[in-house]
Image: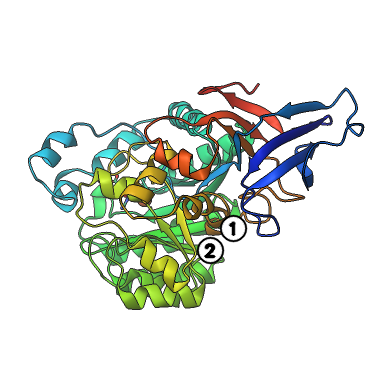
Amino acid sequence: MENREKLVIRSRAIFTADEKYPTLLDGYIVIDDGKITKIESGDLPQTSFAPENEVLDVGEDLVLPGFVDPHTHLVHGGSRELELDMKLAGKSYMEIHEIGGIRSTVQATRSMNEEELYNKAKASLDRMLTFGTTTVEAKSGYGLDKETEIRCLEVGQRLNREHPADVVGTYMGAHALPPESTANTKGYVEFMLTEVMPEIKERKLAEFCDIFCEEGIFDIETSRYYMQKAKEMGFLLKAHADEIVPLGGAELAAEMGAVSAEHLMAISDRGIEMLAESGTVAVLLPATTFFLMADKYAPARKMLAAGVKVALATDYNPGSSPTENIQVAMSHACFGMGMQPEDILHAVTINAAHAIKRERTAGSISIGKNADILITDVKSPAELIYRFGVNHIVRVYKRGRLAAEQGRVCYE
Ligand code: NIG
Ligand code: FE
């Protein structure tokens, strides 16, 4: 995307997420060719900006880096509102999983062609953009056969090329056992490792791979074996860990040098220590906790106190978090997990960028990074979190270009 002209944004409250600047900078940002080229405190100099430069003075409105959503299941078919009755009748996530759950989405996903999957995922990505998300991780994992997994990853790559948001691919064939091999975990793991992943690697369809390490899904030993092999193939590792049962998934993720461990509602104290030591990012998904009607959120404050790098994500998926709005996760991070507004902002910007290895280009307002910038309708991080349930994002700039405004996308 070419963007030669300069844009200058002036605000009394710029949350840069870059530790070289004060938490809220009273100053201005210069954007040139889609990148941030200057960040200064204070008023705009009288003379230096030529008339062809657009100068946007937003007064006291809070300016933020574009949000990074580091855990989504963006590409899938169908929806699962029919499970709501079962949930309300008291059935647990795993009970629903036994009779449909992920596998019902697998059926819906397999039945859609590339164009259909693309259109559905694009609509979701547009919605994410209007809520301020400019970089998204997208997991496969609702195909489970080779053809559909590859199709879903291809859709993610096409969106990365054609949509303003950046899309980072994760292969998650290890999301569940496919309906055709429910009794053969070992065989399915070998199938992924030998039949599917070499092609994904060769065609660079995914940088990361992820596994649902959970009682009744993939146990610790299988997960360790799978992660070790995936690492040897050159994949960066992620794990859905300790979501429901404290199985030791966080410890395993740390041991394997995973980039991130995700969910962590049932993480142990040892798991917290190990994440802090290894630098593995904890990606917390409080919108999922809320939607699962679970009684315990992930212990975010304990993790922060222990020095764990904490990120937040939507977990957008049809079974446990059907929302594209990262501001929902931010609300639950505060009101469910007791996180401070500024910690929440770090968790959806720079820490989230670390969780998907995009910290060099995204996640903060820093010189040299992409000009992914949000203009809000609030004056402070506290006001942003306090007024929950509304979209606070007024304008979304992606690489210096206006991509969404007042809840609508407006990119060409
Ligand atoms: O991240 N936990 C596993 N996978 C998804 C939910 C999958 C589904 O129910 O469709 C999640 O919550
Ligand atoms: Fe997930």
Label drawn at residue 357: 1
**Residue found at x 46% / y 50%:** 341
Q: Closer to the N terminus: mark 2 or mark 1?
A: 2
Q: Is residue 307 above or below residue 13?
A: below
**Please, what is the three-letter code of the amino acid marked with disc 1?**
Lys
Q: Is residue 2 visible?
A: no
Callout 1: helix, strand or loop? Answer: loop
Q: Nearer the viewer, residue 174 or 240?
A: 240
Name which quarter of the figure residue 177 lies in: bottom left
Q: Residues within 10 Å of mark 1 (few under 14, many from 20)?
A: some
What amino acid is labelled 2 in the image? Leu
* Of labels 2 and 1, the one closer to you: 1
Q: Is residue 38 visible?
A: yes
Q: Position of residue 47 (x, y in %)?
A: 92, 31
In the rendering, at what x and y percent does residue 376 appear? 56, 33
Q: Residue at x 51, y 37 (%)?
A: 155
Q: Are marks 2 and 1 in contact (CB under 8 Å)?
A: yes
Residue 220: mark: none
Q: Quadrant of residue 186?
A: bottom left
Between 159 and 297, the one nearer to me in the picture: 297
Identified at 71% across, 29% down, the residue is 57
Q: How many discs appear?
A: 2
> How far apart are the two marked residues, 2 and 1, measured between alpha carbons?
9 Å
Q: Which residue, given by chain and number where applicable, does mark 2 sit on?
A: 236
Give the quarter of the figure containing the N terminus.
Answer: top right
Q: Secondary structure at mark 2?
A: strand
Please indicate whether residue 333 sits to the left or right of residue 56 in the image: left
